[in-house]
Image: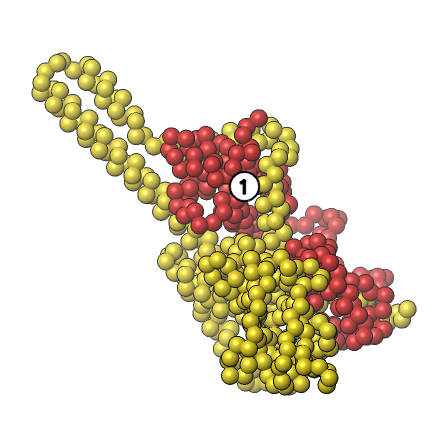
Chain colours: A yellow, B red
């Protein structure tokens, strides 16, 4: 082996570190949960998968979520009972005291038993009892409201901290790009100016985030973070039986997939495999011509599209031209567009 | 033995009912204590820290139970609280380290603050040849382009396998595909990369 040749694994490790730096802001647990439940729109799901492939932390959190779900479902004890008992006892000491809704009633009862049986005193005691009761109810309601307000504020604070971390990450990324652009032997002035403007903008946004501690601004901050997310559509369906530039995969995102029909035949066959896609009860496939007219439509139950074989769709009597193949996932209450491919039939 | 097999929904119904709140709270604690312990332990916290963080999580649950809207699964709500609690603990830990000044102990491994220890070359040690470094940079660029040119799913499989060192099952879990699909994707990726990179990729397995 050539001694001068660099170690490939070392090169890959360095490359991993560089690419991870461009992964963008981390994903919150809320989005990861939505991803795991399959409720994210296709484009967002795709962008998230791209991020997960670059970000060790978020990929790790997703695996932790899986483990947590499994462990929660199992419910088995996984260690010494004494540990759990210790934690419970410490926790009960830290819990806030009970709402004092009953005590005043008992106190008032004792008081009335001591006073002489005078009518005026009974009235006074009753008024006092009512006042104490009213005060207790008011105190309980206030405590309840305050507790809820505190929980809301904590949640908003966490969201704000997440947004702050995202903005810091974006700023660091822009600064890195700027440094790289400056270090280039032939500086592209316009690009540098753009990056400087971006850095200034992000710095201002970061300052704004730091300045504003009020919870109501967290929504705007989250928006700043979400602007970093790249949205794109890529194929997830396998095309078989013909050669395409992508080794048997349909190309999405506006790319045109060449479909060659043999001279003696008037049909072509697509093999659709949903093995790597979240499961819908049913799928609708449509072939649409240049004018938007649906030439063919078919439905397939979700299960039949799984596995290596998938399902095949044979299209007859289609002449040369451009067509769109649209695939939608069907739920009882909604229809989701999963992918759309441009086919150039030749 | 407590009723650990009780459905989570039934436990939370008790929590919302003031008369049964305490009982529900204990059932909830027993049910999620070990999953939470493993979660924090996996993040590198000590047993004592895990105990504290579990308590912190349950205090937040106690305070937030009324505001839970019920539009998410209970265990997911709990997981979010636990993840935020862990992140907060890490931030505090990092902030504490930043505020304090660390004085390295003499002779301790990694304590030498000389330029040589900071990535330079100590006397007698092997110095990375500039030529090798240059070749490494060049290969990095070639690899970046080759990996970027792979189809999306293949590219993601490669990154998760090589950069994050995950096994097939973990990659399948993250990309929500089957392990056999991961295998196929990595096999195809290897062939493509070998074709593009030639000798540089020889002997390397995905």
Q: Position of residue A188 (x, y in %)?
A: 59, 85
Based on the displayed image, in which of its 4 quarters is residue A7 positioned?
A: bottom right
**A43 and B156: which is toward the camera:** A43
**Residue under the image location 39 percent in, 50 percent down:** A153
Query: Is the residue A37 above or below the residue A203 in the image?
Result: above
Q: Which residue is denoted by mark 1 in the rendering?
A: B53
Residue ID at (44%, 50%): B71
Compared with A215, A174 (above or below) is below
Left or right position of A150 against A81: left
Looking at the rendered image, the quarter that the C terminus of chain A falls into is bottom right
Task: Determine if residue B96 is in view.
Answer: no
Where residue A291 appears, as percent x and y from the top left, is 51, 83
B86 on left or right of B134: left
Q: Which quadrant of the view contains residue A189? A: bottom right
User: Which residue is painted at 49% across and 47% down in the image?
Assistant: B73
Q: Nearer the viewer, residue B184 or A214?
A: B184
Q: Position of residue B34 (x, y in %)?
A: 59, 37
Name the secondary structure under disc 1.
helix
User: At which x and y percent is residue B12?
Assistant: 45, 38
- Residue B9 lies left or right of residue A257; in this view the side is left
In the picture, the quarter occupied by the N terminus of chain A is bottom right
Total labels: the figure holds: 1
Mark 1 residue crowding within 10 angstroms, few (<14) / some (14–19) / many (20+): many
In the image shown, does B77 or A93 lie closer to the viewer? B77
């Amino acid at each position: 082996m050539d001694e001068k040749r660099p170690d490939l694994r070392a090169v890959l490790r360095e490359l991993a570190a560089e690419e991870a730096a461009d992964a963008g802001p981390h994903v919150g647990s809320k989005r990861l949960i939505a991803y795991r439940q399959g409720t994210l729109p296709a484009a967002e799901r795709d962008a998230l998968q791209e991020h997960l492939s670059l970000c060790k932390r978020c990929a790790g959190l997703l695996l932790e979520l899986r483990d947590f779900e499994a462990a929660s479902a199992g419910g088995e004890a996984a260690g010494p009972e004494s540990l759990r008992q210790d934690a419970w006892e410490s926790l009960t000491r830290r819990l806030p005291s009970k709402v004092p809704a009953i005590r005043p009633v008992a106190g008032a009862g004792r008081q009335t038993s001591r006073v002489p049986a005078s009518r005026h005193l009974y009235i006074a005691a009753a008024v006092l009892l009512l006042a104490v009761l009213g005060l207790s109810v008011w105190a309980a309601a206030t405590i309840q409201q305050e507790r809820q307000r505190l929980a809301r504020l904590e949640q908003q604070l966490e969201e704000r901290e997440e947004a702050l971390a995202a903005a810091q990450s974006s700023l660091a990324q822009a600064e890195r790009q700027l440094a790289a652009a400056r270090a280039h032997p032939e500086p592209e002035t316009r690009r540098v100016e753009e990056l400087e403007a971006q850095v200034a903008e992000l710095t201002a946004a970061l300052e704004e985030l730091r300045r504003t501690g009020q919870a109501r601004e967290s929504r705007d901050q989250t928006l700043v973070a979400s602007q970093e997310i790249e949205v794109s559509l890529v194929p997830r369906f396998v095309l078989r039986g013909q050669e395409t530039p992508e080794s048997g995969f349909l190309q999405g995102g506006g790319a045109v997939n060449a479909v060659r029909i043999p001279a003696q035949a008037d049909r072509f066959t697509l093999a659709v495999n949903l093995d790597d896609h979240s499961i819908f009860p049913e799928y609708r496939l449509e072939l649409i011509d240049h004018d938007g007219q649906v030439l063919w439509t078919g439905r397939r139950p979700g299960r039949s599209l799984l596995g290596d074989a998938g399902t095949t769709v044979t299209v007859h009597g289609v002449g040369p031209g451009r067509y769109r193949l649209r695939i939608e996932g069907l739920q009882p209450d909604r229809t989701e567009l999963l992918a759309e491919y441009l086919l150039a039939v030749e | 033995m407590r009723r650990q097999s009780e459905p989570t929904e039934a436990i939370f119904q008790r929590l919302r009912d003031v008369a049964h709140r305490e009982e529900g709270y204990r059932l909830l604690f027993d049910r999620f204590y070990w999953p939470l312990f493993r979660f924090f332990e996996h993040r590198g916290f000590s047993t004592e820290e895990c105990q504290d963080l579990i308590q912190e999580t349950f205090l937040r649950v106690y305070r937030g139970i009324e505001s839970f809207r019920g539009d998410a699964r209970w265990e997911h709500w709990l997981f979010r609280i636990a993840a935020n609690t862990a992140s907060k603990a890490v931030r505090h830990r990092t902030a504490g380290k930043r505020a304090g000044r660390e004085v390295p102990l003499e002779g301790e491994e990694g304590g030498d603050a000389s330029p040589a220890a900071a990535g330079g070359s100590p006397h007698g040690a092997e110095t990375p040849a500039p030529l090798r470094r240059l070749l490494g940079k060049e290969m990095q660029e070639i690899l970046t382009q080759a990996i970027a040119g792979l189809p999306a799913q293949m590219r993601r499989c490669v990154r998760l396998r090589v950069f994050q060192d995950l096994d097939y099952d973990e990659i399948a879990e993250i990309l929500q595909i089957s392990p056999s699909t991961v295998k196929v994707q990595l096999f195809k990726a290897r062939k493509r990369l070998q074709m593009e990179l030639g000798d540089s990729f020889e002997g390397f397995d995905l």
